[in-house]
Structure formats: C-alpha cells, structure tokens
C-alpha cells in the first residue's frame, strides 16, 4: 500500500522520534515503508543510515551513499554520516568533501584524515589530495594541510622518500619551526638528511643552525654541522656567524669521543695556523677511524708542515690515488737521507718535469730538489750536470754553493772545507738550505755558527721539527741541558717519530732521573711509530724502566724492541742487563751469548764478556769466571770492570773456601784479590766500591787460622813505595779500617760503609788480648759506637744500623743495656720479622737472667726465621739453665742440623760427653739417651761439631776443654789414632797443671795401647809424674805387650804393695801377675796367685782361673770358678763370656748334647744377644753333620742382623767379618760355593780380620 506525501512526512517525523528514543528497529520499518512508496526518498535513506550506523556500518554506508548521490555531493548530512561509518579507503574523499562544506572545521577533519592514513594500504591518493589543499589561499586550511601531510609522510617514510620526496621536503621545510607538531626534532633531522641528499648545503646549514638555537644539546645537528664543515669548510665559514669550534665544543661536551667533532676542530685549527692542535686532534680521529681517508689527507698536510717526513710518506703510500704527486712528497723522501728513498724522489721529480710546468720558478724549484736527490743517491756525475743546469737557469749562487759543500762533505768527509764554501745565513732564504748549512758547521765543530743558521731557519719555519732537533743537539754538545731539553721537547712535540731526538732527550731525562716524563716521551713515541721506527723507543723505554728498577717491565720493553726486523745488538745487551738485574741469570747468559753471535766486531763485546763472567761468579762457577776475566784482561790489561770482577771472584772463592775450612787455599785467593785490587787502584783510586772490597778481603783474611792470617800488600798502602809488606793479625784490621775510611771519603753518605767501619772497630776491640791491646779497647768501642750512630743518622730506617749499635752497647766495657734494648726494639719496629734483632734481644734478657722474656724473644726470632741457629741456641741455653737436660740436648742437636756454630757445637758435644761419662760402656747408656747415641750418630755428630771448633784454633786456656772433649769422643768412637793426635796437641800446652798433664798422658798412653803401639805407650806412661792405679797397670800392661815381662812383674808388685787400696784392685793386679808367672814358670805358680786373686767383684780373675783349669784339666779349679761366676750368665755385658766358659766345661766332659741344650735355653731367654748365637754356632760345627752345619751357618749370619738392629750393642765391621768367617767355616763341607761366597764377604767386610782370611784360605 502506497503512501501519499502527507503520510510520508508523518512517518518520517515518527521515525525521527524513534531514532531519538533509540528504537532503531521500529524506525527502520517505517523508513523501509517509505522507500516502498518512494525508493529515492532522501530523508528515509539518511535516517536508515543513522539507524544502521552503530549496528551495521555496511548497510549504513550503502544508504548514506545513495542519499549522497541524490544530493549531488552537496548535502552535509550523508557526508557526516559517512565520515563515521565509511570504510577506510573511502574516507579521504568523504572527509575532503566534508571539508569543502565545513571549512571552519578544517583542523578536526585533518585530524580524522591523519587517523585514516594509518589504516590505508596506499596513501598516494590521500597525499595528493592533501597536497592540493596546500595550494589554496586560505591560510588556516593550508597550515592544517601541511601539518597533516607532514605527519602522514613521517609515519610512512619509505613512500615519502621514494615517491613524494619533493612534497616531503616542502612539508618539512614549512613545518620546521612548528614545535606543536609531534616529532619536531625527528622531522628536522629528516629534513637535514634530505637537504644533504639533494646537495642543498646552504639550506641545510641554515636549518641546522636554527635547530641548534632551540636544541643546543642535539648531537645529530651538531654532528651535521661538523660534517658539513669537514666536507666544505670554506662555505661554512662564509655563511656561519659563529666559528665551527663553538659547535664542535658543544658536541664534544656531550660526546667526548665524537670523531666528527675532533675532525672539525682539527680542520679549524689547521686553517687557523695552530698546526700542533690540529695534529693532536687529527691523531685522535686516526686512532678511532684509521681508515678515514679525509683524516689521512689532513694528517699528510700537517706532517709535511711539521717536518715529520717519515709519517707523511707513510700516509702518502696509503693514499697514492688520492694525493697528487708534488714537491711535498719529494721533500719528504729526500729529507730522510736514504738512498732508496732518494731514488724514488728522482723518479717523481722526472715525472713532474715531464708534465707541463706552469712557470720557470716552479721548474727551478723541482730541479733544486732533483739535485738534492742525486746527492742522496750518491750519483755525483749526474749531480754535476744538474748543478750546471741550475747555473744555466740563473739559479741563486748561494744555493749552488750549499750543494757543493754537501758534496765535499759526502765525498771527502772534510767538514771544515765544506763549511768554507757556505754563504752567510742572511744570504739563504730557504729553511732547508739553512738546515744543511747548519749541519755542516756542526760537523765542523763550529757549534755557535751552526746555532745561528738553525735559528735563522726557525724564523722562516717555526713548526719544523728538524730545525729544533738540530738546535737541541747543538745545545746538548755545549752542555746547556735546559735549552737542549726545550728544543728537543719542541722537536718531538712537532714530530713524535724523530727517533734521534727521542734518544737524546730520553738520555737527558734518565740522567736527571725524571722517570715520569721519560716514560710518557717513550710511550708516545712507541704509540705513533710506523714500521721499525719504534724499536729505539722500546729500547730507551727499557732503559727507563731499568733506571726505576722495574725489571719486569724493562724485560717486556726490550723484548718488544727485539721483535722488529734486524734488531740492534744493544737490544740484546739491554735485555740481558734486565734479566741480570732481575736475578734471572741463566736467561741473561743466553741473551748475552746471542748478542755475541749477532755481531763479533761491535764495541760492546768486552762488556758482554764481562757480564757473562759476572754471571759465572754469581752462580759460583768461579773457575769459569776467572778464566773469562783473565781473557778480558789479556785484551785490555787496564779494563777497570774486569779487574774489579776478577778481584771480587777471588774474594768470593776465598770466602767459600774459608767456610769449608780450607784456610790455605782461601788465603791464596785473598792474596790474588789484593793483587788485582792494587792494580785497579793504581789506575783509578777514587772508587769507593774498590776500597770497600779491599777492606772486605782484609777482614776475611783476619778471620783465618793463625798460620794463614797474613797478606802481602804493596808498601804504598803503608807509605813504603816500591816495597811489599806482609801484614798480620791486627795490622790487617788496621789497613781495613783505613780502606773503609778512604771509601767513606769518596762516598760520605753511604750508610753501609759507616756500618762496616763500625763492625771493623768492634771486631778489633773484641780481638784485644794482651795488655797493650787492652789499652785500645775502650777507644775501639768508642769509634765503633760513633760510626754506628753515623750510619743511623744517614738512614734511621735500616734495622741493621740499630741492631749493630745495640750489640756494641752490650759488648763494650761500660755496658749500656738500656740503650741496647732500645736499639733492638727500634730494629724490630722497622722490620717486624727481624729474627736477628729478636735473637739479640733474647740474649740481652738471658744475660740478665730474665728467662721468661728471653724465651719470648727467642720464640719470636724462631717464628721470623725458623733456620736462625742463634735463636735455637738461646732456647737450648734456657733449657739447660732451668734443668731441662733432655730438652737442651734435643735443641743443641737441632742446631747441629741447621749448620755449624761454635756455641751449639760445644754445647752438644759437652752433653754427649756427659752421657757417655755416666755409663761404663756405650751400650749401657741410659735408655732415654740410647736411641740418640746409637741411631742418631750422636758421637759422630759431636766429633764433627767440636772438630770444627778446634780445627784452626791454637790451644789456650779458653779452648783447652774443647780439645779434651774431642779426645774423649774420639776414644769413645774408637778413633784412637785421631785421639792420640789431639792428646799430643794438648800435652804441649805449657800452662797445664800436674794433675791435668798426668791424666792426659795416661789417656794418651791407653790410646797407644789400643793401636798396638806398645813402645810409645810405655814411654808415655813413664812420663806420668804421679802414678795412680790406672797409670801403673797401664805401664805394666804396655811392658807386657813389649815383652819386658820382668819389668812388668816388678811394676805390678810395686802397685800391689804401694798403690792398691781395695780387694778389687789387688785382685786385678794379682790376676795380671799370674798371667806373667804362667809365661815364666808354668801353671802351678800361676794357680797359686789366681787362688789369691779370686774375688766375686773381679770377673777377670774368675775367667782366668776357669780358663787355666780347662786348659790344664784342673776340673776342681774350673768348677770353683764356674760356681762363683754362674750367677753372672744373665748379665748382658759379660754373660756371654760366662756362657762360653761353661759351655767349654760341658764339652770338656764330652756332653755335647747338654752343651747345645744349655746354650739353646739361654738363646730362648735372650734372643737379642748375638754372642750367644755365635757360641751355639761353634758348638754345632763340632758335630760335623750337615744339618748342624747349616744351622750353624744360619746362626752365624743372624748375628750380623742382630748386631745391626740392636740398640744395645756397639756393632762394628770386625764382628760382622768374624760372623761371616764362622758361617763360611760351617758351610765348608755342606756347600762349597756358598762357603766361598761367605768367605769373600767376610774379607770385604773387614780386610784386617784374621779369621776372615783364614776362612778364605780354607776354601
């Protein structure tokens, strides 16, 4: 059913009401009803669009587009609706139509366009539409259009720069100052990039400057300003009001490592004439970007102006395609004065001349450098032709004269003649000619004139490194170090690669000990060196480290120098010296030997041989060192260092020999040292070290034994020229003091010399013995104290100085113990772990009987140095004083393990003597000492220690006891002949009292008895003035051994009547007399005396009686003796004698089985007694049966093992040899081969054993 117009109006009105009430479904029905009547009803289509706008945008768009078509794009309503629901690709056109209808809402619509652009796949149409908007005459719409357009393009940079670059540039330019638009800086950065791309440099500069005014810390803009200046400095300087340095400084404040900032500054300073600043900044750039061509080209220009010719050539070689060939590179090549580079310069000169030369002046200049190139190449024929050509071109005669002078210098080496041709300095206008002239005058030793020429050259070129180098060298030759340093510093500042300047300046710095400046100088030289230029810098850097005693760094520096091609011999020497100073002597020796191989003609050869010899000396290869020093002295007899080295070697060898107690050889080497030092002093007498060494040799000789305590010294030292004087004892010390005084004269501030002088006077005071010398005692101590205080004054932080003063205060007659304690404590404060000072402090407390403090001090000394023998001796003395004998012995024994010391040796030997003296035999010492005596070789160690104490001593009242202790120990060790020698020495001492002399003679006579020297024994016993039982019995025994039985019997009779005081002594004498009667008158009279001598306390009488009874079958006497001694068969010292006699008694009765059982039972009771096994072995042999003989051999061999392992038996080779002989005898019938082997072993064990030889002969 169709509606009329009135109904349509009514329905539309109802539909509007429904839409207001958001009843869109009813409104849609009414509008659709209208469209059924009028399908082109505009309002119904608009209302339908409004209804579907939120629920179905596609339907809304469809209805609104139909409405817009009906209105012919002029109606606002459908456009407004479409702006809300149309798809993205339709929105731009919709919004632009809407903009035409509502221009007042341009900002709002442009904002929607900006939002739409992010949803579009292709913004081309949108950009074009907006660009059309910018062409309108309405300012507000145009501004809004540019604003929207620039934002859209910024969001789509790829399309903007590839398709719409022009539009993008205009948009960025128009909006460049509009800070309200987002991404203001980013847009301006993009604009700068586009302007640079389009080479609109002026516009770029203006934009960048404007941005910098609003954003002064924007590094992007600052970098572009610097880059623009780097690329075209003239344009920038013309259009920029502020200097580029202003902007570069801003950039470097923000980014301190900005390469472009440094580069801009470098170019700015270069153009301003500040070449040094330009060079330093360009080098910073080069460090960061070494391959940047622009930087290299700038450095090339700078190096040419600074006279850094090798560096300029290096840059030229890197950029030959970029740098034109001109006189600059030719100048660089010629100035290096090398033939190969001169030849290259010749080629380049010819190339320049081959090209069209713009002017005659230019051609003349090229010819001048060509001539100089020929001079460098030593092509003198062509040089003359070139000179002629210069003359033909009317070249300045002064220039030609300079060239002729240079030729004379090169060909004739006559600097004086060359200098005579030179013009005055005012006639030369070129700096390089002035330099050449100045060098000629310098070589002619006319230094003042040379300086004038160099100064004139400096006025022309004030930045030429070469000029200042020659000036510095001249001033150095004149010893004007201040001016020399300034000129050389200036030369190096201009050219880091001026190697010669670096070497000279480094030497001056080292001389002044200006280590920091020297290190910086050399490190900079190494840093900026090219190729092999840095090797000398490394070498001098090593010398600098050597001067600072930084030996590891020195080693690394010298190694770096050696890595270069064709290293100089001095580099090896430097590395060797560094190793030597560090203490790596083997490495140093290897390096020195390489240096010898590298060049056999170098002048440093003697020095290298000297160092190798010194290394041998330090490593104690004294023979090799002496050989090398002698070879050096053959080449140069007056070589001072070799003379000192060989003298020092002889001194050290003498010291070693003295420590080995080889005093004769030690004195010979000391004499050689004196001879060489005398030669040295005759050549050069003002070396304090030589006088000190002389004194040390004299001091060493004064400590030798009395027989070797002398030296032959030139009479010049005693004001007896031409004569040789023999000095002894205190004369040596006197001359030593004079030598030290002489050393102090040349080096008065050396604390070591003062300390050694103090020690000299102290030792002289301690050596004072007779009354005449005693008068000088206090004087010597006074001198010692003054010298020691002077050493403290010179160096109060040296603990040795304080320690010495403390020792002097303790030793001098007027002791100052408080000051001594203060000195020792000061030494400890300086050096906390000063073991010597702690030990001395302990001795001070010990002398005052302050045991507790002494013990603490010695403990601290031991903690500081566990091998300090004096601290251990102190603890041993403390233990001895408080009654801890065992602890004292252990401590003294530990001292002997640490080394030889007189106090510890005497202490240990005395304690060992005490232990032995308290026991009848070695095997019967107290159990607590038995292990020490038997297993720790206490006697042998004590003999060694006391022997060292007495070896080179002359016997006197002080050391008499030492000799007696030594003799006692030698007797205990069965070293009888050595004991006799000691007794002979002691017996010659004139101050012995009678009792001492008699005792010593008696002991010596018994020693003669032990070595079977019976004649000397008799003579020695007869020298005893007051006889006692021991000496009388010894005399009689000696006479018996010599065969003088009557005299022996008479002596025994006298002893029995006058000296024997108890039954034991009488029994002993009667036993000996019975033995003599047995020889003279047979057994009957002997038995009578033996019956008289029988005594339970005298086992020898019982043994003799039993033996006599068995020999003569007097069973009654044998039984009587056995009955009395039976109870002693369990005694470990004599039990085996008792068992032997009882066994013989049983065997005499033909009861062999009983004898075996008897001995076996005792072996079971005492399996550790080897003598019992020997007895049983002898019994078993009597059976003459194989099984018994094998057992006998095993028993005999087992005695050896028991003797060795037993701590109770003093085993020696004689007993072992007898046991092996017995075993061999046992195996004779059973196993002949084994018997021979045992017999051989027996002989090898002790060739003096008769039983061994008997067994050997038997097999």
Image (cartoon, rainbow, N blue to C red):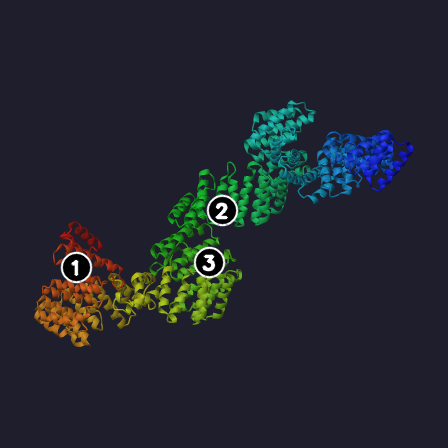
Mark closest to the chain's N terminus, 2 or 1: 2
**SS class of the residue under badge 3?**
helix
Neighbor class of circle 2 (other Cα within 10 Å; few <14, some 14-19, many 20+) is many
Q: Nearer the viewer, residue 581 or 1228?
A: 1228
The image quarter containing residue 321 is top right
Label pair 2/1, CB-CB below 8 angstroms: no
Image quadrant holding the N terminus, namely: top right
The image quarter containing residue 871 is bottom left
What percent of the width, then of the height, locates residue 984?
26, 64
Rendered view: 549 above or below 846: above
What whole-number distance in Å separates the C-alpha atoms at marks 2 and 3? Answer: 31 Å
What percent of the width, then of the height, locates residue 372?
61, 29
Residue position for label 2: 578
Would you say 300 lies left or right of 682 here? right
What percent of the width, then of the height, locates residue 530?
58, 37
Residue position for label 1: 1177
Q: Residue 167, which numbered label?
A: none
Residue position for label 3: 740
- Marks counted in the figure total 3
């Amino acid at each position: 059913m169709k509606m009329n117009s009135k109904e349509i109006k009514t329905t539309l009105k109802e539909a509007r009401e429904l839409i207001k009430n958001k009843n869109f479904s009813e409104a849609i029905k009414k509008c659709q009803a209208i469209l059924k009547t009028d399908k082109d009803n505009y309002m119904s289509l608009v209302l339908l669009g409004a209804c579907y706008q939120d629920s179905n945008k596609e339907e809304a768009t469809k209805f609104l587009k139909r409405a817009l078509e009906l209105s012919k794009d002029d109606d606002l309503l459908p456009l407004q609706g479409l702006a809300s629901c149309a798809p993205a690709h339709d929105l731009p056109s919709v919004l632009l139509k809407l903009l035409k209808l509502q221009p007042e809402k341009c900002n709002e619509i442009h904002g929607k366009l900006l939002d739409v652009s992010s949803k579009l796949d292709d913004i081309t149409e949108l950009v074009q539409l907006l660009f059309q908007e910018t062409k309108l005459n309405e300012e507000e719409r145009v501004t809004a259009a540019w604003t929207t357009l620039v934002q859209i393009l910024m969001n789509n940079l790829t399309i903007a720069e590839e398709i719409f670059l022009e539009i993008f540039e205009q948009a960025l330019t128009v909006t460049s100052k509009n800070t309200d638009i987002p991404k203001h800086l980013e847009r301006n950065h993009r604009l700068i990039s586009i302007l640079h791309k389009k080479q609109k440099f002026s516009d770029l500069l203006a934009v960048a400057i404007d941005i910098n005014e609003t954003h002064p810390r924007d590094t992007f803009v600052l970098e572009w300003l610097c880059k623009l200046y780097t690329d075209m400095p003239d344009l920038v300087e013309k259009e920029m009001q502020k200097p580029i340095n202003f902007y570069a400084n801003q950039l470097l404040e923000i980014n301190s490592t900005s390469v472009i900032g440094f580069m801009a500054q470098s170019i700015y300073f270069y153009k301003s004439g500040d070449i040094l600043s330009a060079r330093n900044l360009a080098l910073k750039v080069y460090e960061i970007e070494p391959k940047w061509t622009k930087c290299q080209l700038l450095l090339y220009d700078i190096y040419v102006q600074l006279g850094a010719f090798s560096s300029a050539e290096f840059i030229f070689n890197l950029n030959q395609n970029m740098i034109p060939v001109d006189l600059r590179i030719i100048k660089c090549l010629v100035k290096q004065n090398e033939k190969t580079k001169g030849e290259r310069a010749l080629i380049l000169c010819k190339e320049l001349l081959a090209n069209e030369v713009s002017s005659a002046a230019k051609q003349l200049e090229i010819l001048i450098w060509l001539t100089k190139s020929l001079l460098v190449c030593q092509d003198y024929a062509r040089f003359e032709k070139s000179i002629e050509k210069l003359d033909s071109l009317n070249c300045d005669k002064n220039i030609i004269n300079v060239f002729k002078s240079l030729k004379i210098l090169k060909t004739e080496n006559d600097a004086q003649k060359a200098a005579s041709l030179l013009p005055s300095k005012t006639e030369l206008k070129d700096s390089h000619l002035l330099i050449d002239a100045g060098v000629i005058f310098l070589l002619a030793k006319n230094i003042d004139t040379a300086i004038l020429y160099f100064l004139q050259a400096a006025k022309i070129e004030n930045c030429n490194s070469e000029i200042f180098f020659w000036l510095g060298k001249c001033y150095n030759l004149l010893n004007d170090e201040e001016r020399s340093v300034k000129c050389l510093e200036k030369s190096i500042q201009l050219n880091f690669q001026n190697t010669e300047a670096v070497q000279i300046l480094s030497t001056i710095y080292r001389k002044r000990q200006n280590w920091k400046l020297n290190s910086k100088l050399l490190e900079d030289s190494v840093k900026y060196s090219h190729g092999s230029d840095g090797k000398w810098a490394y070498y001098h850097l090593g010398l600098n480290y050597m001067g600072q005693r930084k030996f590891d760094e020195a080693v690394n520096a010298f190694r770096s120098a050696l890595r270069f091609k064709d290293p100089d011999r001095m580099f090896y020497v430097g590395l060797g010296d560094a190793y030597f100073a560090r203490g790596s002597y083997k490495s140093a020796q290897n390096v020195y030997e390489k240096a010898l191989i590298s060049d056999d003609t170098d002048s440093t050869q003697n020095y290298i041989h000297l160092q190798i010899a010194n290394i041998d000396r330090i490593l104690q290869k004294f023979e090799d060192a002496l050989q090398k020093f002698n070879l050096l002295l053959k080449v140069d007899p007056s070589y001072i260092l070799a003379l000192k080295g060989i003298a020092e070697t002889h001194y050290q060898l003498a010291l070693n020999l003295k420590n080995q107690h080889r005093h004769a050889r030690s004195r010979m080497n000391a004499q050689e040292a004196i001879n060489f030092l005398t030669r040295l002093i005759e050549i050069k007498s003002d070396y304090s070290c030589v006088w000190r060494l002389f004194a040390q040799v004299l001091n060493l000789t004064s400590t030798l034994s009395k027989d070797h305590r002398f030296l032959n010294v030139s009479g010049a030292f005693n004001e007896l020229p031409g004569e040789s004087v023999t000095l002894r004892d205190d004369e040596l010390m006197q001359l030593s003091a004079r030598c030290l005084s002489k050393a102090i004269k040349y080096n008065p501030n050396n604390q070591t010399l003062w300390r050694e002088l103090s020690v000299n006077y102290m030792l002289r005071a301690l050596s004072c013995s007779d009354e005449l010398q005693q008068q000088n005692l206090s004087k010597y101590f006074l001198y010692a104290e003054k010298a020691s205080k002077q050493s403290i004054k010179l160096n109060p932080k040296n603990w040795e100085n304080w320690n010495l003063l403390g020792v002097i205060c303790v030793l001098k007659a007027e002791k100052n113990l408080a000051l001594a304690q203060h000195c020792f404590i000061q030494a400890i404060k300086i050096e906390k772990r000063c073991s010597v000072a702690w030990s001395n402090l302990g001795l001070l407390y010990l002398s005052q009987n302050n045991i507790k403090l002494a013990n603490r001090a010695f403990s601290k000394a031991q903690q500081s140095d566990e091998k300090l023998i004096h601290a251990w001796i102190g603890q041993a003395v403390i233990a001895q004083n408080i009654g801890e004998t065992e602890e004292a012995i252990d401590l003294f024994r530990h001292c002997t393990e640490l080394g030889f010391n007189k106090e510890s040796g005497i202490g240990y030997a005395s304690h060992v003597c005490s232990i032995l003296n308290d026991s009848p035999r070695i095997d019967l010492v107290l159990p607590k000492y038995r292990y020490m005596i038997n297993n720790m070789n206490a006697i042998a160690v004590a003999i060694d220690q006391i022997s060292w104490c007495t070896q080179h001593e002359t016997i006197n009242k002080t050391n008499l006891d030492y000799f007696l202790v030594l003799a006692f120990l030698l007797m205990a060790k069965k070293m009888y002949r050595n004991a006799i020698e000691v007794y002979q020495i002691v017996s010659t001492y004139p101050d012995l009292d009678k009792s001492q002399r008699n005792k010593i003679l008696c002991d010596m006579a018994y020693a003669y008895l032990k070595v079977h020297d019976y004649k000397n024994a008799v003579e020695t016993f007869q020298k005893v003035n007051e006889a006692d039982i021991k000496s009388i019995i010894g005399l009689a025994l000696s006479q018996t051994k010599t065969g003088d039985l009557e005299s022996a019997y008479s002596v025994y009779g006298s002893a029995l009547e006058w000296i024997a005081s108890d039954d034991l002594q009488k029994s002993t004498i009667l036993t000996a007399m019975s033995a003599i009667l047995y020889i003279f008158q047979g057994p009957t009279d002997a038995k009578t005396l033996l019956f008289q001598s029988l005594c339970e306390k005298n086992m020898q009488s019982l043994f003799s009686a039993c033996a006599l009874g068995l020999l003569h079958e007097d069973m009654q006497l044998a039984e009587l003796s056995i009955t009395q001694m039976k109870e002693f068969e369990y005694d470990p010292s004599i039990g085996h004698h008792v068992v032997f006699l009882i066994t013989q008694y049983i065997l005499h009765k033909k009861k062999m089985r009983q004898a075996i059982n008897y001995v076996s039972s005792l072996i079971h009771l005492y399996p550790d007694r080897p003598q019992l096994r020997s007895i049983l072995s002898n019994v078993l042999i009597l059976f003459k049966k194989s099984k018994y003989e094998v057992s006998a051999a095993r028993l005999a061999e087992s005695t050896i093992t028991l003797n060795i392992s037993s701590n109770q038996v003093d085993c020696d080779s004689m007993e072992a040899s007898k046991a092996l002989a017995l075993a061999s005898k046992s195996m004779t019938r059973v196993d002949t081969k084994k018997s021979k082997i045992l017999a051989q072993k027996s002989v090898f064990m002790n060739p003096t054993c008769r039983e061994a030889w008997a067994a050997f002969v038997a097999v």
